[in-house]
Amino acid sequence: MCGIVGYIGTKKAVPVLINGLKSLEYRGYDSAGVAVLNKSEADFQKRDYEIKVVKDKGRVKNIEDKQELEGLLDATIGIAHTRWATHGEPSELNAHPHLDNHSLFAVVHNGIIENYNELRSFLLEKGYNLKSQTDTEVIPNLIHYYFFKSALAKGNTSIAKYIKNEPLALLKAVNRTIKDLKGSYAISVISPLFPKKIVVAKKDSPLVIGKGEGENFIASDIPAILNFTNTFYFLDEMEMAEIDADKVTFYNINLKQIDKPLKSIEWDAVASEKQGYADFMLKEIYEQPKAIRETIGSKFNSENDINLDIDLDFTKFNKIYIVACGTAMHAGLATKYSFEHFCKINTEVDVASEFRYRDPLVNDKTICIFISQSGETADTIAALKLAKEKGAKTIAIVNVIDSSITRVADYTLYTHAGPEIAVASTKAYTAQVTLLSILSAYIAEKLNIKEVADELKELKKDIAELPQKVEETLKVADQIKDFSQKVFDEKDIFFIGRGTDYTVSMEGSLKLKEISYIHSEGYQAGELKHGPIALIEDNVTVIGVATVPGIISKTVSNLEEVQTRGAKILLVTNDSIPESEYKNIKDNEKNTIVITPTTSSYLSPVLSVIPLQILAYNIAKAKSLDVDKPRNLAKSVTVE
């Protein structure tokens, strides 16, 4: 959570920082702030520069509109932050950047300092005064403490002389500080004592460095600085960097200088802009054909042969775990059926935050697949590390190149969804389901299971046809919008389905909760009579997904049960199902039937989820809510 951006160069820093913060607001928008090094106006300081901070509660626009920002426009070095609150309520006082007591060090931080109470007590004993409720405020004060402790230890009476004799003094103070920190962090530090440097460090939180001509950039995510550069350095765990305008020098935790490769990113900066769409979420819904097409194209050749760079003897494995959080976990649930049917391997799907705490039965005969759009999800990374400790082979399904998860997993498969800015995931989910389906087909082919050989050929053909069928499915948008006008002010909405349709019901329910704030639940249709049907009363909305051959009549029967109790129904089915199957539903004027193209039941979640994404979007718009930035949520959950 939280977004960090930084700039050092010859341009005016503030516009770059504000632009970056706006791009990062999906990571948190409880408060925001900037800190720059400005020409000093205080003669008594006898310094050329001083730190100037502007911050406020709420959105980035709140600080952008502040008059104080105009006085900082000449600054060419600065750091900024948009916050998702962990310690301390959203407020101007708790907003980043944070300063030490003497305003010599400014810090922005993403992560959680787990031992901050202990560090706070230490600093209070040393005479420091901590003003905020945040864990972050200990960091600049610790830097101050270790900087001056080192200076005094070397007998310096002049700070200027100390800095001249010790050009890495800021780096060393930050290094000594992070050795005290337990938890996760990505931090950026500036100081008027070092007016031509930014020092950064990371552990378990994302941070990238963008390289420009005579300038360098810092950000939590690539899209924040894509307008300025497409070449990046990626820090590994427990690494640091000292950044000047014209160079970046990297160090490990022991302050040994190391080399880092510079990598070019293919994402187009335009991809992270709205391009005429009202919201990023709507744009990303309509980008799904392209995202799926490019995900397939990177793995299929013209003969539909699958090429994945995974060198494993799959005959040695007897269990597959799919581990993820939120929407990514739903993608795992949707494809569990494919792994078990085609690969004949027992497959379990688990929430990452539960997996790591329940001593899972994992060993060297287990394949563990970890899914994360950002590649920075804290619980998923921790679960991945646990699986590796237990001897499992690990595969990451991820959208962001060179993200943290890719450096831990044995193998990485990239979706090609491009930047996903809206908090509620859409194209990342359908790209994940597509890629997981490809992986299941790849493993099945390697296992050479004869009984599913013909089905496998059909599955691959259906995968190749998915982009076109997604485009056709998007044509239901007007029909869904009309239905949304009937239900946008409801308090409860229920989703039901069986098999893969049930997994889509859960994802549809999550989308609705995330952005419309309507209470909703996804239920197995067969479980209605075991309790949930007690919640159905006149005019309650029930959304049914029925696309899986052989069990459609069962789901329709359950929908008829809620219909007799007064519910109004939205049924999502496909064009291979005869109308006679759902005639009683269709004949009720309160109900709406949405027809999607037919595909393999193992791929149907890619198509049947799209009407539910569009429904959630239109309901939120009808309620005049911020679709891209729902309350209390952030895009990447980089803390537990």
Image (spheres, rainbow, N blue to C red):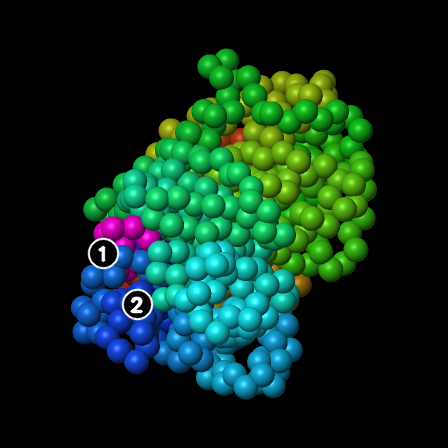
Front residue of 52 and 432: 52
Residue 484 falls in image quadrant = bottom left
Q: Name the residue under label 2.
A: 49
User: Which mark is on residue 12?
Assistant: 1
Q: Mark 2 or 1 closer to N-term?
A: 1
Q: Is residue 325 something that shows in the picture?
A: no
Q: Is residue 352 magenta?
A: no
Q: Residue 442 location, x and y as percent? A: 62, 25
Q: Residue 456 location, x and y as percent? A: 61, 22
Q: Residue 485 location, x and y as percent? A: 29, 60
Q: Does the magenta stretch include residue 10?
A: yes
Residue sitting at x 78%, y 52%: 360
Q: Is residue 116 above or below residue 313?
A: below
Taking the view exactly as shown, the residue that stands out farthest to the top is 303
Q: What element carries label 1?
A: loop
Q: What residue type is labelled 2?
A: Tyr
Q: Locate residue 149 relative to residue 30 in the image: left or right.
A: right
Residue sitting at x 23%, y 56%: 12
Q: What stretch is highlighted in magenta?
A: 8-19
Q: Is residue 428 above or below residue 28?
A: above
Front residue of 294 and 615: 294
User: Which mark is on residue 384?
Assistant: none
Q: Locate residue 8 relative to residue 417 in the image: left or right.
A: left
Q: Locate residue 276 relative to residue 199 in the image: left or right.
A: left
Q: Which-is-in-front pick, marks 2 and 1?
A: 2
How packed mark 1 is, by other alpha carbons closer than 10 Å (few <14, some 14-19, many 20 or more), is some
Q: How many labels does the image show?
A: 2
Q: Residue 319 location, x and y as percent? A: 76, 38
Residue sitting at x 45%, y 36%: 262
Residue 610 falls in image quadrant = top left
Q: In which quarter of the image is the C terminus?
A: bottom right
